[in-house]
Structures are given as C-alpha cells and as structure tokens.
C-alpha cells in the first residue's frame, strides 16, 4: 500500500469513528481499558506512562522522559483531580482524531501537486 493509500485509509477510518458514536465509544473503551491496567476505572500517571512506553517500544522509538509524560497527563486531566476519566480521554481522542483527519487531508492535497 502506498503512502497516499495509507493516508486515505486513515482519513476514512477516522472520519467514520468521528461520525459514528457507537464506533467512537468502542474505540474509546478499547483504548481506556488498555491504559487502565489495574481496572479501577481511572487512569493514573503511572498507567499513562506505562502505556506510552509500550506504544513507543512497539514503534521502535524511545519513550518520552517522565517529565514529558507528566505534562501530557496534566493536559488530559481537565478537572485536576489527578486521574483521567473516560470523559477526559474522550475529549482528547475526539480532538486528536479531528486533527489527524485534517493532517491527512493536507498531506493528500500536497501529494497531488
């Protein structure tokens, strides 16, 4: 598959996730459960750090420094209660997916030139 096809597939998949509440909830639940390793229904800083570390390892890149993860956690913890709720993660994912759709569109436009 070419880079352009990958971009189109990603854009189409994310557009579906954003327009289908059931699909978005399924993705949100899967991601939340993958991060919430102790199953308490709340994401704490150590769970986020482990999740990001595992994701980076799978991609073959170095993980961020603990201070960087702490900064990400602070941004996601909208009510400053030292936990990331499902709703807080939902806000982030929706925004992240919207930005990725825009990114794909820009890259596809640039490829046509």
Image (spheres, rainbow, N blue to C red):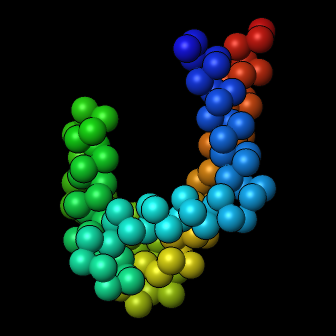
The residue shown at (47%, 81%) is 85
Q: As rendered, which of 65 and 108 lies closer to the eye?
A: 108
Q: As rendered, which of 69 and 46 lies closer to the eye?
A: 46
The residue shown at (65%, 58%) is 23
Reply above or below: 79 against 32.
Answer: below
Q: Answer whether residue 75 is visible to the viewer in this image.
A: no
Q: Answer whether residue 41 is visible to the viewer in this image.
A: yes
Reply above or below: 75 against 110.
Answer: below
Residue 63 lies, in percent from the top left, at: 24, 46
Q: In which quarter of the image is the N terminus?
A: top right
Reply above or below: 2 against 95.
Answer: above
Indicate the quadrant where residue 102 lies.
top right
Residue 70 lies, in percent from the top left, at: 30, 68
Seen in the image, is 107 located left or right of residue 44? right
Residue 101 lies, in percent from the top left, at: 69, 41
Q: How many labels does the image show?
A: 0
Furthest residue toward bottom: 81
Residue 11 lies, in percent from the top left, at: 68, 36
Q: Quadrant of the C terminus?
A: top right
Seen in the image, is 108 located left or right of residue 73? right
The residue shown at (27%, 39%) is 58
Indicate the quadrant where residue 8 lies.
top right
The residue shown at (23%, 60%) is 50
């Amino acid at each position: 598959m070419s880079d352009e096809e990958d971009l189109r597939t990603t854009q189409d998949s994310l557009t579906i996730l954003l327009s289908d509440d059931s699909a978005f909830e399924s993705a949100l639940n899967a991601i939340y459960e993958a991060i919430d390793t102790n199953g308490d229904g709340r994401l704490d800083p150590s769970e986020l750090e482990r999740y990001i570390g595992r994701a980076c390892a799978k991609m073959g890149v170095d993980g961020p420094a603990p201070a960087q993860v702490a900064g990400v956690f602070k941004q996601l913890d909208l009510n400053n209660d030292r936990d990331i709720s499902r709703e807080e993660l939902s806000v982030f994912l929706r925004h992240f997916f919207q930005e990725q759709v825009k990114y794909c569109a820009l890259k596809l436009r640039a490829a046509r030139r």
